[in-house]
Image (cartoon, rainbow, N blue to C red):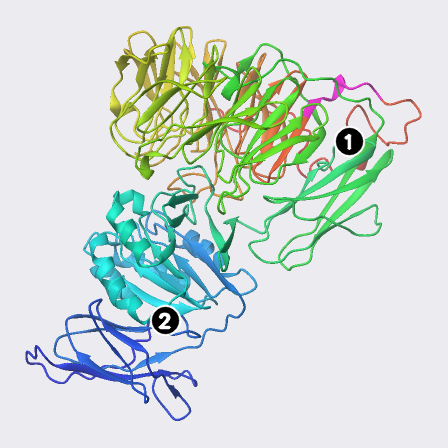
C-alpha cells in the first residue's frame, strides 16, 4: 500500500508537550512525493492527529496542530484516492507534507469488498491471487476494501504479505483492522497501515472506516468527523465486526442517529444481509477460503445509486472458468429443442459468451444467474460439434462433440426424497439402485448458486434451494418438474436458503438464513405461513443454516438459542427450548428424529449434542461438548445408534436412548477447531457409514467399530470451499447410497459411482463445475445440483427406449459416440479402480 508519508523534520529531541506539527497538503501532479511547481495545494483538507484533534488547511494547503504520539493523517477529499496519507509522529512535533493522488475512477459509486484474508494460515500466493482477482473488475471500481482480519496472527511477515499482495493493484485499497490484526492492541497495524479509524469522500458519499474491537471509541470520532459532511450525504461504514457480533445496541443506535445507514462487515465468515432498525449490514465471507456458511472464497462487487444497492458475488478461482455444462462433451441428448448451458465466472467484468454448433452462426448465451449461461437451441439427429467462446482474453475456448438421438422420453421418477438425506433419520440410502452409465435427460439453470444441503423431491416436483451470496436478493426456492425440468414456480425471499427444504403433505417448509421458517404451497409456491424461530434473540443468534426435519406433521428446526417444533399445517410453534444459552454463531447441522427423540447440535462451541422428547420438548440427555465443536454435518440415526462428527473430523457413535458414547475415530489427521472438515451429512447402508470430508477424502467406516474400510480421494477444484484452507480438494456435500452403489459429488466437479463394499470407482463423469450440493436419488433418476446454478436429471442410459433403426445419430452403442468423440476430454465415461485405497 502506498503510505504517502511525505517527509518529516523533527524540531528537536527534547520533550515538547505542546510542540506543533505542520506542513502542506497538495495534489502530487508530477508524482515525485514532494511539493513542487505544478502541484496543486488543497484548501480545506482536514488533517487529523489520531481521532480527536483536527484542523483544516488554508488556501495554500498548509496546516498546523499540536503534535502527539500517534498517527497523523488526512481525510482525503472527493476525487482523491481514498486511503489516507499518513505518518507516524511524536509529541516532539515536526513537518509533514501530505501528497495526494487523484482517483481515476468515474461514474456511479462502485467498489469491491473482500474480507478476512487471514494471511499466515492462508499462504501469501493464495491471498495475492484473491486480491488480484478482486481488483481486476471492470469498469474500474472507486476502491477495493478489505474488511478486516488481514492477518492471522498479527505478525510482521503477515502484514508484509498483505502489502506485497496489494502492491501494484489498479484500484486504491482501503484496509480495515480486525480482531486478528489487534492482538498487540493495533501496534503492528498502525506501523504498516496507519490509522485504524479514518474517513474519506468518494463518488458523492462519505465513508467511515471504524476500528471495531472497541466500539465506544467510534461515536465520539463520528461526532467530530460528520460535522463537516453536508446534510443529505450518504454515510457508509466499513468495520470488521458486525454490530450484532458485539451485541451493542447503543452502538447501532448511535450509528443510526448519526446517519450511518449502511455497513459492510466481515468477521462472521459468511455472506449475509442483516437488518437493524434503519441500518443495513452487508456481511461478507472470506476472500481466499471457504466460509462458515459453506460459500467458497470470493469477493463482492457493490454498486450504489441512491437508495438502490446492487451486489454481485464472485468466487476466487484457480483459473478463468468457461465450461460446457449441458450437453456434456461426449454425451447424448434427445434431438429437438434443448437448453445449451455453459458456465462462466466473469469476475465482475463484462463478458459475452457465444456458442457455435456445427460451425453455424454464433448464438449468445445470456447470463442466467450464478455461473450459468443459457440459450435454447434445436439439434437434429446427428453427432454435433460445439464451440463455446468468451470475448475476453484468458478464457480458453471450449471445443466438444455431443450426440442427439431419438431415444424415447424418460419415465416418471420413483420414490419421493422429501427432506435432507431422504428422511428424518438422514440415512441417505435407498434399496432401489441407480446404476451407471448415466445420461442427462435435462438441465435447468435456477438463477443462483447451488450448494449445501440438497434439493428434495415430492409429488413429481424437485424443490431446489438457491443462494445469492452477493446480498441474498435472488435467494429462495425454485420448483422444477422432476420429469421435464420445467420451472413450475419460483419463490425469492430476499434471503438465502442454505440447506434442504422439507415436504410435509401439501406444505414445503423452508428455512431462510434470517431465522424465519416459511410454509409454501407445494403446487404454487404461495406462502401459507411464516414463523420467526429467532424471535426475541440477538441478531448473532438468528443465523439459520440448518434444514428442517419433518415427522408426523411437525417440523423441527433450530437456531443457536432456540430449538422449535412447528406445526406444518399452520406454522404454529408447538414447543421451543433454548438448547445452548450461548449466542455463539450457528451450525449447518440439522436435527435427526427417531423413536420419539429429536437430537442435534446448535452452535459451533462446546454445547454438545442435545436430545429432546419429540412431543413435549422435554430434555432427555446432553452429550459431551468436546465432540461437537464446529459440528457442521447433520447426525444420522441407524438401528438406535447415532453417528455424528465435528470440525476436526472426529467421528463417533452414540446410543440414541441414553447418549452414551460408543466408539470415536479421527478420520483425517491435522484438523482443528475451525477446520470444518465434516460438513456434508453422511449416508449409511449395509453396516457402513460413508462420511464426506472437506480434507480430500470420502471415508467408509464400519458402523460397529469405526474402523476405516476404504477411502476415495477428490481432485483439485477451481474454487476454495474449505474453511481455513486454500487447498481445493473437498467432498463438501452429502453422498447417497442406491442399492450397492455410493454416489458422491466433489468440489472437483466429478460425479463418482463407487462400489459400496470395496471402494472401487465403477464410473465417473466430470460435470465441469464444482459439486457442492447433495444428490437426490429416485430410481431411475439421479438429480445433481452444481455450484454454477444448474440442476441436472440423470438416468441410466439403458432405461430409455432405443432410437428407431433409421436414426441419423452416429453412435457406437447406447448413449455413446463411438470413435468420433474424444472420450478422454472430460472423462465422461470411464471405469477404473478407486483413486486412492488406504
- Is 14 left or right of 25, judged from the image as shown? left
**Residue on which disc 2 sits:** 2
Give how far across and how far down residue 387 sits, in percent. Answer: 75, 48
For the residue pair 502 and 280, the one nearer the viewer reads as 280
The residue positioned 25% from the left and 81% from the top of the image is 96
Density class for disc 2 (Cα within 10 Å; few <14, some 14-19, many ≥20) is some
Q: Position of residue 628 (x, y in %)?
A: 31, 25
> What residue is disc 1 on?
333
The image position of residue 186, as x and y in percent, is 22, 58
State the image coordinates of residue 23 (x, y, percent, origin top left). 25, 84
Residue furthest toward the right?
806
**Crowdedness of circle 1 by 10 Å Cα count: few (<14), some, many (20+)?**
many
- Quadrant of the snapshot with the C terminus: top left
Q: Is residue 525 magenta?
A: no
Decide: is 75 above or below 270: below
Task: Choose the circle earlier in sequence order: 1 or 2.
Answer: 2
Q: Which residues are magenta?
A: 794-802
Secondary structure beneath dot 2 equals loop
Label 1 sits on a secondary structure element that is strand
Cα separation, mark 1 vs mark 2, equals 56 Å
Whether residue 62 is visible to the viewer of this picture, yes or no, is: yes
Tell me the residue at 56%/55% (across/down).
Answer: 348
Q: Nearer the viewer, residue 273 or 721?
A: 273
Quarter residue 73 falls in: bottom left
Amino acid at each position: 500500500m502506498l503510505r504517502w508519508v511525505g517527509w518529516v523534520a523533527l524540531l528537536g529531541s527534547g520533550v515538547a508537550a505542546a510542540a506543533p506539527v505542520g506542513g502542506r497538503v497538495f495534489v502530487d501532479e508530477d508524482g515525485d512525493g514532494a511539493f513542487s511547481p505544478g502541484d496543486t495545494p488543497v484548501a480545506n483538507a482536514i488533517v487529523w492527529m489520531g481521532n480527536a484533534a483536527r484542523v483544516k488547511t488554508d488556501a495554500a494547503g498548509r496546516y498546523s496542530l499540536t503534535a502527539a504520539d500517534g498517527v497523523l493523517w488526512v481525510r482525503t477529499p472527493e476525487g482523491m484516492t481514498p486511503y489516507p496519507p499518513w505518518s507516524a509522529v511524536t509529541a516532539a512535533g515536526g513537518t509533514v507534507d501530505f501528497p495526494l493522488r487523484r482517483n481515476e475512477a468515474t461514474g456511479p459509486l462502485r467498489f469491491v469488498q473482500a474480507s478476512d484474508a487471514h494471511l499466515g494460515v492462508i499462504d501469501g500466493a493464495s491471498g495475492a491471487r484473491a486480491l488480484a482477482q478482486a481488483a481486476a473488475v471492470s469498469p474500474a471500481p472507486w476502491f477495493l476494501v478489505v474488511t478486516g482480519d488481514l492477518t492471522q496472527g498479527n505478525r510482521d511477515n503477515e502484514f508484509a504479505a498483505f502489502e506485497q499482495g496489494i502492491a501494484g493493484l489498479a484500484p486504491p485499497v482501503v484496509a480495515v483492522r480486525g480482531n486478528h490484526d489487534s492482538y498487540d492492541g493495533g501496534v503492528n497495524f498502525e506501523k504498516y497501515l496507519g490509522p485504524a479509524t479514518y474517513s474519506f469522500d468518494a463518488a458523492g458519499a462519505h465513508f467511515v472506516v471504524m476500528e471495531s474491537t472497541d466500539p465506544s471509541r467510534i461515536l465520539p470520532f463520528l461526532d467530530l468527523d460528520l460535522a463537516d459532511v453536508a446534510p443529505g450525504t450518504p454515510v457508509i461504514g466499513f468495520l470488521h465486526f458486525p454490530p450484532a457480533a458485539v451485541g451493542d445496541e447503543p452502538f447501532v443506535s448511535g450509528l443510526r442517529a448519526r446517519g450511518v445507514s449502511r455497513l459492510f462487515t466481515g468477521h462472521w465468515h459468511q455472506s449475509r444481509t442483516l437488518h437493524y432498525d434503519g441500518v443495513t449490514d452487508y456481511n461478507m465471507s472470506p476472500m481466499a477460503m471457504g466460509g462458515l456458511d459453506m460459500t467458497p472464497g470470493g469477493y463482492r462487487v457493490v454498486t450504489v445509486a441512491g437508495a438502490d444497492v446492487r451486489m454481485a458475488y464472485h468466487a476466487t478461482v484457480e483459473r478463468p472458468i468457461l465450461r460446457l455444462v449441458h450437453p456434456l462433451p461426449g454425451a447424448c441428448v434427445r434431438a429437438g429443442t434443448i437448453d445449451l448451458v455453459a458456465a462462466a465466472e466473469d469476475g465482475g467484468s463484462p463478458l459475452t459468451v457465444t456458442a457455435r454448433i456445427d460451425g453455424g452462426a454464433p448464438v449468445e448465451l445470456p447470463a442466467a444467474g450464478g455461473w450459468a449461461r443459457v440459450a435454447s437451441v434445436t439439434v437434429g439427429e446427428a453427432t454435433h460439434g460445439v464451440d463455446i467462446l468468451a470475448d475476453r482474453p484468458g478464457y480458453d475456448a471450449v471445443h466438444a462433440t455431443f450426440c442427439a438421438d431419438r431415444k424415447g422420453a424418460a419415465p416418471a421418477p420413483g420414490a419421493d426424497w422429501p427432506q435432507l438425506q431422504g428422511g428424518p433419520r438422514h440415512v441417505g440410502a435407498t434399496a432401489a439402485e441407480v446404476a451407471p452409465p448415466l445420461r442427462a435427460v435435462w438441465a435447468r439453470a435456477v438463477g443462483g448458486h447451488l450448494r449445501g444441503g440438497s434439493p428434495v423431491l415430492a409429488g413429481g416436483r424437485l424443490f431446489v434451494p438457491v443462494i445469492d451470496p452477493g446480498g441474498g436478493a435472488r435467494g429462495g426456492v425454485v420448483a422444477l418438474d422432476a420429469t421435464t425440468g420445467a420451472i413450475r414456480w419460483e419463490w425469492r425471499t430476499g434471503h438465502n436458503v442454505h440447506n434442504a427444504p422439507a415436504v410435509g403433505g401439501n406444505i414445503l417448509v423452508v428455512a431462510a438464513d434470517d431465522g424465519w421458517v416459511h410454509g409454501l404451497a407445494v403446487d404454487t409456491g404461495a406462502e401459507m405461513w411464516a414463523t420467526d424461530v429467532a424471535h426475541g434473540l440477538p441478531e448473532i443468534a438468528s443465523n439459520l443454516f440448518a434444514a428442517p426435519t419433518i415427522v408426523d406433521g411437525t417440523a423441527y428446526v433450530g437456531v443457536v438459542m432456540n430449538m422449535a417444533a412447528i406445526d406444518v399445517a399452520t406454522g404454529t410453534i408447538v414447543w421451543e427450548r433454548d438448547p445452548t444459552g450461548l449466542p455463539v454463531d450457528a451450525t449447518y447441522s440439522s436435527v435427526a428424529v427417531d423413536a420419539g427423540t429429536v437430537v442435534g447440535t446448535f452452535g459451533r462451541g462446546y454445547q454438545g449434542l442435545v436430545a429432546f422428547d419429540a412431543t413435549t420438548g422435554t430434555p432427555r440427555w446432553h452429550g459431551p461438548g468436546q465432540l461437537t465443536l464446529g459440528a457442521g454435518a447433520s447426525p444420522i440415526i441407524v438401528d438406535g445408534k447415532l453417528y455424528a462428527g465435528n470440525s476436526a473430523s472426529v467421528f463417533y457413535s452414540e446410543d440414541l436412548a441414553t447418549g452414551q458414547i460408543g466408539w470415536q475415530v479421527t478420520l483425517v489427521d491435522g484438523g482443528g477447531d475451525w477446520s470444518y472438515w465434516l460438513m456434508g451429512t453422511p449416508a449409511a447402508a449395509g453396516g457402513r457409514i460413508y462420511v464426506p470430508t472437506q480434507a480430500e477424502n470420502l471415508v467408509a467406516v464400519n458402523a460397529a467399530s469405526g474402523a476405516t474400510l476404504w477411502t476415495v480421494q477428490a481432485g483439485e477444484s477451481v474454487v476454495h470451499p474449505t474453511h481455513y484452507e486454500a487447498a481445493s480438494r473437498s467432498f463438501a456435500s452429502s453422498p447417497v447410497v442406491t442399492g450397492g452403489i455410493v454416489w458422491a459429488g466433489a468440489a472437483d466437479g466429478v460425479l463418482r459411482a463407487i462400489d459400496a463394499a470395496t471402494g472401487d470407482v465403477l464410473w465417473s463423469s466430470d460435470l465441469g463445475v464444482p459439486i457442492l450440493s447433495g444428490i437426490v436419488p429416485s430410481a431411475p433418476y439421479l438429480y445433481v445440483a452444481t455450484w454454477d446454478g444448474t440442476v441436472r436429471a440423470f438416468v441410466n442410459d439403458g432405461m430409455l427406449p432405443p432410437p428407431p433403426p433409421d436414426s441419423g445419430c452416429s453412435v457406437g452403442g447406447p448413449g455413446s459416440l463411438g470413435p468420433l468423440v474424444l472420450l478422454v476430454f472430460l472423462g465422461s465415461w470411464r471405469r477404473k479402480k478407486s483413486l486412492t485405497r488406504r
